Image (cartoon, rainbow, N blue to C red):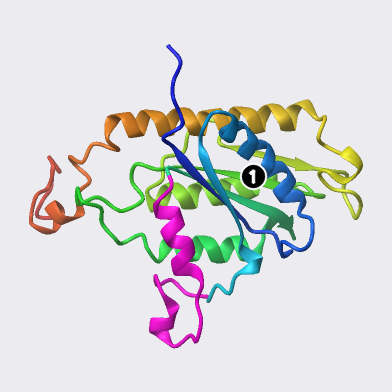
Amino acid sequence: MTKRYDDLSAVFLNGSLKRSSEPSHTQRLMDVSKAIMEANGVTTQTLRLADLDIAPGVYPDMTDHGWDRDDWPEVQEKVMAADILVLGTPIWLGDKSSICTRAIERLYGYSGTLNDAGQYAYYGRVGGCIVTGNEDGIKHCAMNILYSLQHLGYVIPPQSDAGWIGEAGPGPSYGDDGIGIGNDFTQRNTTFMTWNLMHLARMLKDAGGIPAHGNQRIAWDAGERFDHPNPEYR
């Protein structure tokens, strides 16, 4: 039986240090995943975070905390409307970019919000990541990003990271003169990641999200302990 994906949506947040007026190697690989989704009817949107004025902090809107401008609330609105979130980042000094880090911090600022079932608001969504660079670090960055997303409440499918690294040191990166585009390992992993994101998003949507029993903050605060064996914390 063929699954439908045309009622799903995905948002790609590109943490490149370059604005959209400049080509992004990370964007080139994200576009592979985006194309697969769109070929199957998924509605996609890409945001280049460097184009925006995103204030530092861990609150939903930092203009409530002394900042004159904060574009993050608009980003957050798009994230919450999407079934799938893909974070993209280059590798700098062996780690994800500062912009990607800021995006995760701002996502964290919304993590205490609850959905209609009394669960944390990110429940029922799936997340993945794409990483590019010229030094080793794809798995390190993916480990950090995917841990952060699951801690916030996202569901992480198997093989939900993909990336490309070229030779160590300065030089061409993904997409320059066709570099990496024909690399079977990178293209396979990007394809598997994309389909696993769609499959799991489909499953969650069909199931109505994550079952609420045992993870409702409201019920816990009201005294429900969901079979916890030591409710008095002795």
Q: Is residue 234 left or right of residue 89?
A: left
Report the front residue among 26 and 132: 26
**Quarter occupied by residue 92:** bottom right
Determine if the magenta segment contains residue 140: no
**Quarter occupied by residue 50:** bottom right
Which residue is at a point 73% across and 33% down the rendered structure image? 186
Q: Is residue 225 visible?
A: yes
Q: Which residue is mark 1?
A: 130
Q: Kindly state the secondary structure of the residue where label 1 is placed.
A: strand
**Quarter occupied by residue 155:** top left
Q: Is residue 108 left or right of residue 118?
A: right
Percent x, y for residue 143? 57, 46
In the rendered image, the quadrant that contains the C terminus is bottom left
Give neighbour class at mark 1: few <14, some 14-19, many 20+ (Cα, 10 Å). Answer: many
Q: Is residue 177 left or right of residue 61?
A: right
Which residue is at a point 58% across and 74% down the rendered structure image? 53
Which residue is at a point 12% across and 52% down the rendered structure image? 219
In the rendered image, the quadrant that contains the N terminus is top left
User: Which amino acid type is marked by label 1?
Assistant: Ile
Percent x, y for residue 25? 77, 50
Q: Is residue 137 visible?
A: no
Segment colored magenta: 56-82
Q: Residue furthest top?
A: 1
Q: Does 202 sit above or below residue 71?
A: above
Determine if the magenta segment contains residue 59: yes
Percent x, y for residue 39? 59, 30
Which residue is at a point 29% across and 61% down the rendered structure image? 113
